[in-house]
Amino acid sequence: MTESSNTPTPRQLFTLMQRQWLGDTQTFTELLAEDAVIEMPFARPGRPSRIEGREKFQAFAQPQQAAFPVRLDAVTDIVIHDTADPEVIVAEYTLLGTLTTTGHSAAAPFIAVLRARDGQIVNWREYQNTAAIMDALSSATGDLATQPEPTPPRT
């Protein structure tokens, strides 16, 4: 938050997201505006690539995350790019995680565009490296076909 305001900036919202991914009590959905749009352009066929609304996103994400056997351990290689629009940042980062069923650790790079309004996220467009995620899961278990879909940000 800035000294003159308690309204989180896009950079501060991204920092709050990282803390949440690693187990902080605040949830991603608490950071979302009611009319937020979550986009996952590289979603597998048959999966939504766009979800409109905080409640719809939460209803979609919670069961996905419950079935995804990965504990996130760290967010590294973080590079934040400011844009000409003060409400928008582009974040590059790597998520490090452990497959809870085997203890296998792996990493995958991501890129996301975050748009904020009034201290809440109104658009989260995440480019997941789905191939790297699926490769990490299959190398740990030996069976790519049985792996759950990589999940959107933690609710």
Image (cartoon, grey):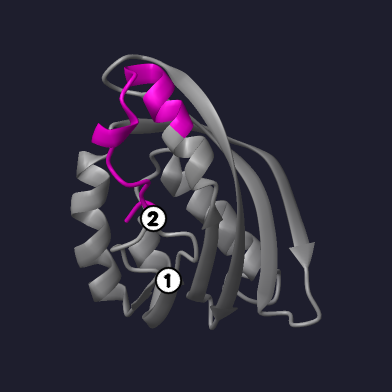
Residue at screen point 69% across, 68% down: 89
**Residue 137 shown in magenta:** yes
The range drawn in magenta is 135-155
Q: Is residue 82 left or right of residue 57?
A: right
Residue 38 percent across, percent down from the top left: 42, 71
Name the amino acid type tagged 1.
Ile
User: Are the residues flagged by discs 2 and 1 in contact, CB closer than 8 Å?
Assistant: yes
Residue at screen point 68% across, 51% down: 92
Residue 87 percent across, percent down from the top left: 66, 79
Image quadrant assignment for residue 146: top left
Compared with residue 132, is residue 58 higher up or lower down, i.e. above or below?
Answer: below
Q: Secondary structure at mark 2?
A: loop
14 or 150, which is in the foreground? Answer: 150
Q: Which residue is mark 1?
A: 38
Q: Secondary structure at mark 1?
A: strand
Image quadrant assignment for residue 35: bottom left
- Residue 1 seen in the figure: no
Can you say which quadrant of the picture contains the N terminus? Answer: bottom right
Residue 121 percent across, percent down from the top left: 49, 73
Q: Which mark is residue 152?
A: 2
Residue at screen point 71% across, 69% down: 3
Name the amino acid type tagged 2.
Pro
Residue at screen point 52% across, 47% down: 18
Residue 26 percent across, percent down from the top left: 37, 54
Compared with residue 76, is residue 82 higher up or lower down, i.e. above or below?
Answer: below
